[in-house]
Amino acid sequence: MKVICVGHSTFDTTLPMNEYPIENVKYRIPKHIECGGGPASNGAYLLAKWGMDTTIVSVVGNDYYGDRIVEDFIKIGADTKYLEKRKNHFTSSSYIIANMSNGTRTIITAKDEPIEELTERVTTKADVILVDGELPKTAIQVLKDNPNAISVLDAGRVNENTKIIGKLVKYFVCSKDYAEEFCQQKIDYSDKKTLIYCYEKLKEYFNTNIIITLESKGTFTYIDGNYEQIPSIKVKAIDSTGAGDIFHGAFTYFISNGYSLRDAIHYASVTGGISVTRIGSRFSIPNLREVLDYDNVI
């Protein structure tokens, strides 16, 4: 089964701290964590780590961070044919303050001008596609060239790219923030009608399977004639960086390997939940066996 992941790559530097820093104060920490990042990029890394034949389609700069990202994908066994190192473009870099006392993180990203498409057309055929809204022209080309593929959009931002791409995928997976902004409706967990309203507005526009992630409150969708809020697992979070990306990658794995929608969401939630108990997005990805065994060991 061939997977193609199209989207953004960045290089993450995570600074673990026990509290959020105060302005104009010097701090010293014993270590920092460096690894690749980015929504579709993290998803591709997970899929390759879990043994799927994965191609990453992305653009980095011809620089040190770009080299590190390419090396990481080669080591994990991903196909980097379409991981383009572009001159006169700098690799996005993110600097993350991880407050380990409460699991929150603050991210500052340095990002070059957005790129619409690769220099080269993607000709590899796909059975499974994961996209995040970046490289929109290439993402649309890959989706249209593979209409029968199982396709997933990690919808991070409300913009024209995700509005267009969202109509081409079989699974539209967005955050609570995306749903609230798109639908102009605040979600109130004590009033299920607000979740149903957002689901129906998204369903009406995109006309595909809609999944709304709610972080610690689980995931909301429609299964077998019923609205369902599938719970997340309860963990002590120390770093939530990349948890959403990891959820999307895991969901793509399970839905493309024959799991039901409910089970795919459950195991994706387990994967994301385990990841927040560890530091650094790529380093926090559990192995597949750990995820599948989770329900039996708690």
Image (cartoon, rainbow, N blue to C red):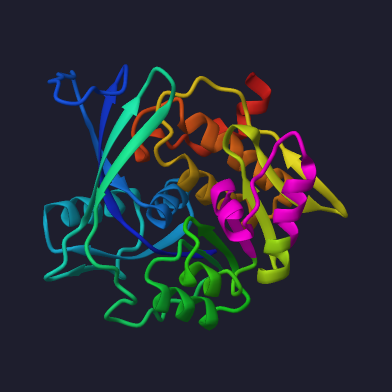
Q: Give the percent coordinates (x, y) of residue 15.
A: 25, 29
**Magenta stretch in the rendered image:** 171-200
Q: Is residue 229 left or right of residue 65?
A: right
Q: Give the percent coordinates (x, y) of residue 178.
A: 55, 54
Q: Is residue 168 left or right of residue 113?
A: right
Q: Give the percent coordinates (x, y) of residue 190.
A: 75, 33
Q: Give the percent coordinates (x, y) of residue 78.
A: 36, 57
Nearer to us in this view, 38 or 95: 95
Q: Is residue 179 magenta?
A: yes
Decide if residue 289 is in sight here: no
Q: Is residue 167 magenta?
A: no
Q: Residue at x 37, y 33 (%)?
A: 105
Q: Split into 4 quadrants, where in the image is the N terminus?
A: bottom right
Decide if residue 295 is in sight here: yes
Report the label total: 0
Q: Residue at x 73, y 68 (%)?
A: 204
Q: Residue at x 12, y 53 (%)?
A: 64
Quarter of the view holding residue 263: top right
Nearer to us in this view, 20 or 234: 20
Q: Residue at x 31, y 17 (%)?
A: 18
Q: Split into 4 quadrants, where in the image is the C terminus?
A: top right
Q: Residue furthest right?
A: 225
